[in-house]
Image (cartoon, rainbow, N blue to C red):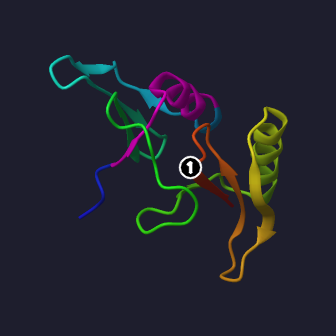
Amino acid sequence: MRIEHVAIWVKDIEKMRQFYQTYFNASVNDLYHNPIKKFNSYFLTFTDGARLEIMERADIQTGHPGDSLGWAHIAFSVGSKEKVEELTTRLVQDGYACTNGPRITGDGYYESVVEDPEKNLIEITE
């Protein structure tokens, strides 16, 4: 058994698609649009086969501020400490917030935590 994909509601689907394509090398399917439900989605596929579905619907526009129950973050392993530092630096230089790290965590990960365009947390791990 494996997780087939995870999904997240977003406010700006095109901005989020571009972010994950640019920084995390996601490949993207064609936009799915359901005019009756006013629903749009993309499946983003990463090099190891993991998939993230980004979805938007006009009536879903608010999230949970700060810490709340539910999903906390998504983590991407980039293969080395140097790559963690390089990607973190690139994201910060391009205006995205780094909320933690790069550092070695208490459970032994070398990681940084950055925010995507809609402030969802992304761990970038070794």
Q: Is residue 13 left or right of residue 41?
A: right
Tell me the quarter of the picture where residue 15 sits. Answer: top right
Image coords of residue 105 (percent x, y): 72, 76
Which residue does the image show at 79% across and 32% down from the upper left?
Answer: 94
Dot 1 amino acid type: Asn
| Residue bearing the label numbered 1 | 120
Q: Considering only vertical position in the picture, is 107 above or below 46? A: below
Count the marks.
1
Which is more toward the observer, 15 or 2?
A: 15
Which residue does the image show at 28% across and 51% down from the upper left?
Answer: 4
Image coords of residue 81 (percent x, y): 78, 59
- Image quadrant for the N terminus? bottom left
Which residue does the image show at 78% across and 35% down from the upper left?
Answer: 95
Image coords of residue 125 (percent x, y): 66, 60
The magenta segment: 6-22
Q: Considering only vertical position in the picture, is 115 above or below 34? A: below
Which is more toward the observer, 67 or 88?
A: 67
Q: Is residue 124 left or right of residue 61?
A: right
Q: Considering only vertical position in the picture, is 2 above or below 11? A: below
Badge 1 element: loop
Which residue does the image show at 81% across and 41% down from the upper left?
Answer: 92
